[in-house]
Image: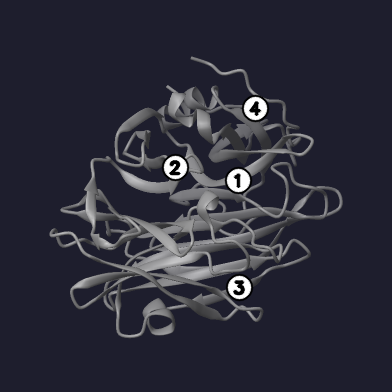
Amino acid sequence: MKFVTRTFTTFVALLFLAGCYLPPVDVGLAVALSSAEQMTLAQSFSLWPNTVQDLYREAREVRFYPALTNSVVPAAGGPLGYFVVAKGDWVSLYYVQLDPLMQPFQGHSDSIQIDSSAVEPFHVVHSLRDVGGEEKIALFRYRPDAETYTVATARNDGTGFPDSRRTDDIATDVAPGLAPVAGGSFAAGFSPVGPEPRFAIVARGGLSLESISFGFDAGGDLISGGSLITGTPPAAPPGFGRVTLLDLGVGQTRTIVNVPVDNQFRTYVLDPAGGEYLPLGIAGRLETVLATGEILTRTRDRFVVSGPSGQTVGSFPAGDLRFVHEREIEISPGELEWHAVFTLTYWGRVDGDELLFVRVYVVPSAELGSLR
């Protein structure tokens, strides 16, 4: 089933139009393109190797996160976005800016070492900008020897190169004496009003789990937003995973936790009334809670859209597609609509030159469960 896509301006390739070449055999790419046909291609470009440091085929994984301080289509002289490159036991975060001629150049970068044998060695959270006009991206990793997360972060206000900060022990800075169980952020459509902290951890203290928000002050230093809600953890001993918070207003917070249990991801919910974390019958790794209230997860080969209580709404093939964030897009003057944003990166050749091709796709969040 194909959808009639809305009209967006397609970003002309920086070097070559990404659609001019596709590798002849790539199952993951073919599956991703099958799903992408139901979405709108909003941005398409290609890069020479090493335009961004470590950008070679040897990289185990390349992700692209388009800047939130731009529209989906970036402007000359503005931020393009962030590349996250996994190579061996290291993950690096690179900020990429555009010059006045729309040519990309690398700004700051940061790298952290990971345990590549872990169930989930790292994950990335890209936060909507707050009222100050900033966007924030965080690279979480679990550090087994210290039983805590490391986070490398970048802050971009849309006027130049962002600051970069790192903390090796979130618990020390945000939740002293507690052991983090999951890291993440507020869902984009359920973020606090105003400049409140947007990132989050769930940490264990005694027999309870605390949902704690954190963010960055004007100087870029880590600050704690304090404990938001406390609940009794599930009976199964969870590994370290992800959390998505929903700010429901009037001081109420809903916590969705997704952790590996016996090497399989399990999702639990703690409602604003507190009490116990209850299991949701949802398969896969948590990606986000959409503005519709539906939960987006990913299994090995499919994206799954589920209702707030865990009922399956729909699913579609994942392939090499990656969900990166949810954002509001103006579909007509003065009318905004929430869209889920996915990216696809792959290597190909044009006239014997090897290039990294990047495509950015958008789809209305309300239609995500209808994709097949």
Report which quarter residue 363 is drawn in.
Answer: top right
- Residue type for callout 1: Arg
Distance from disc 3 to disc 1, alpha carbons, whole Å, reads 23 Å
Q: Nearer the viewer, mark 2 or mark 1?
A: 2
Q: Residue at x 48, y 31 (%)?
A: 368
- State left or right for residue 165 relative to residue 209: right
Task: From the image, tell me which residue sits under label 1.
Answer: 327
**First reached walking from the N terminus: tag 4 or tag 2:** 4
Q: Is residue 333 above or below residue 206?
A: above
**Of the pair 367 and 21, the residue shown nearer to us:** 367
| Residue at the spot of label 4 | 19
Q: CA distance from mark 2 to mark 1?
A: 14 Å
Separation of residues labelled 4 and 2 (CA atoms): 34 Å
Counting from the top left corner in percent of width and height, residue 141 is at 39, 66
Mark 4 surroundings: few (<14), some (14-19) or many (≥20) residues within 10 A: few
Q: At label 4, which amino acid type do we have? A: Gly
Residue 67 in the image: state x and y as whole percent: 66, 53
